[in-house]
Every structure is written in structure tokens, then in C-alpha cells.
């Protein structure tokens, strides 16, 4: 039974977290040899090589067999988040959207740091607009660059007709919220340092 999953979990320090959790590191085939998957792990029983600790089944084949790989991704955005309550507070606070007018700040932000020109052009002022901007960065929606937000909203979440890479709505909003957290952390840290 094939299970189609795409579970990504962003954490500040994946290695520290995984040292505390029983897991099997996913493997993939590269140049005909099994190697460590960059981010994937399994939490269910899985055959593993006792010498390398890697899963003996390639992650693509494992998915076909019903194993569920979870990708743990390092994300420095969470540096400074004290606990879950602090994260919720940071996510729920309205950020200072004018921070996005400062190229030096934008260059420090998760996922949009290399797109300061696009941020300056589009001027997102809420989470939905920021999510749409994140989607425009991808080739499948790049044609919407420079359009007004109402025009962008009409088709931004539609799957492209071709096979070009695009962001799904859930990914875009998740990344947008990570940027909100990061912006609010910047303000919080600046206030503490003042």
C-alpha cells in the first residue's frame, strides 16, 4: 500500500531533537550506493543497517511499501523562540509591516531575503499578501509579478497547467507565518537590547 505523504517539520536544531527520539535515518541511492537522506527519518519499525544506522530500504521504495518518512528541517527562524507559548504569541502579534520597506531587514528574512526587489515592488501588508508573494517567487507563478493583489488572488493558488514548480497555499501560508514570527522576534530583541 503506497502512502503519499509530505511531512516537513521545521525545527531550530534537528540534530539535538533527533538525539532524544528513537528513529531510523532514511536512505537514498546515489551513484548506486545507499547514502543518508538529508532530512528524512522514520519513527516506525524499519529495517536498518547495523553498521551505518541507515534504513536498508531506499526512501522512494519505502514509501511504496507504506513507510512514512518525516523530514526534519533546520530553520534558524526559531532561534530566540523560548517555548510553545512564546511561539504562539509571536505568531499572533501583528508585525510591523513597514519593516518590509527596509531592504537590509528583508535580506535577513527567511525565504524572501534574496527577493528584496520583489518585496519593495509588491509591498505586502498582511499575511495573505505575504503568502501570495512567496508563491510568486516560484516559476509556476512568476508571471503574476507586478500585478495588483486582487489580480494575483484570482489565480495564485491554481495548479499550473504545465509541470512548473509552484508553492501550494499551505506551504506559502506556513512560510509567511514563519516570516511573521521572525519579524516579531526582531522587534522583541531590539526592544530588549534598547
Image (spheres, rainbow, N blue to C red):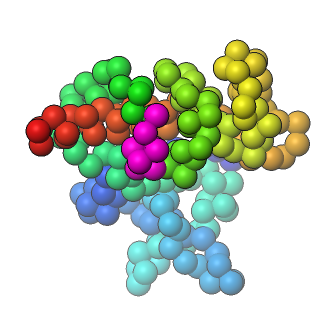
* Residue 53 point in image, percent of width and height: 41, 75
Depicted 24 relative to depicted 3: above or below: below
* Residue 188 point in image, percent of width and height: 20, 34
* Residue 102 point in image, percent of width and height: 43, 39
For the record, the magenta segment spans: 101-108
Q: Is 54 left, or right, of 22 in this rendering?
A: right
Which residue sits furthest right? 161
* Residue 19 point in image, percent of width and height: 26, 63
Depicted 155 relative to depicted 19: above or below: above
Name the one closer to the observer, 103 or 60: 103
Which residue is rendered at x = 88% and y = 36% of the image?
161
Q: How many marks?
A: 0
Depicted 32 relative to depicted 101: above or below: below
- The answer to if 158 sits in the magenta stretch is no
Q: Is 53 left, or right, of 158 in this rendering?
A: left
Does the image show residue 31? Answer: yes
Q: Quadrant of residue 117?
A: top right
Which residue is rendered at x = 34% and y = 58% of the image?
14
Q: Is 85 left, or right, of 24 in this rendering?
A: left
Which residue is rendered at x = 46% and y = 78% of the image?
49
Amino acid at each position: 500500500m503506497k502512502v503519499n505523504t509530505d511531512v516537513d517539520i521545521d525545527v531550530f536544531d534537528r540534530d539535538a531533537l533527533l538525539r532524544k527520539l528513537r528513529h531510523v535515518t532514511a536512505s537514498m541511492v546515489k551513484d548506486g550506493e545507499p547514502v543518508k537522506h538529508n532530512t528524512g527519518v522514520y519513527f516506525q519499525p524499519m529495517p536498518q543497517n547495523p553498521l551505518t544506522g541507515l534504513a536498508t530500504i531506499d526512501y522512494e521504495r519505502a514509501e511504496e511499501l507504506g513507510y512514512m518518512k518525516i523530514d526534519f528541517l533546520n530553520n534558524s527562524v526559531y532561534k530566540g523562540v523560548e517555548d510553545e507559548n512564546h511561539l504562539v504569541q509571536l505568531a499572533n502579534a501583528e508585525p510591523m509591516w513597514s519593516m518590509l520597506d527596509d531592504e537590509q531587514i528583508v535580506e535577513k528574512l527567511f525565504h524572501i531575503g534574496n527577493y528584496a526587489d520583489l518585496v519593495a515592488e509588491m509591498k505586502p501588508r498582511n499575511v495573505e499578501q505575504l503568502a501570495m508573494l512567496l508563491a510568486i517567487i516560484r516559476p509556476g507563478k512568476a508571471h503574476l509579478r507586478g500585478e495588483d493583489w486582487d489580480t494575483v488572488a484570482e489565480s495564485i493558488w491554481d495548479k499550473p497547467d504545465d509541470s512548473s514548480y509552484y508553492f501550494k497555499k499551505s506551504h506559502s501560508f506556513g512560510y509567511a507565518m514563519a516570516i511573521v514570527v521572525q519579524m516579531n522576534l526582531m522587534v522583541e530583541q531590539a526592544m530588549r537590547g534598547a
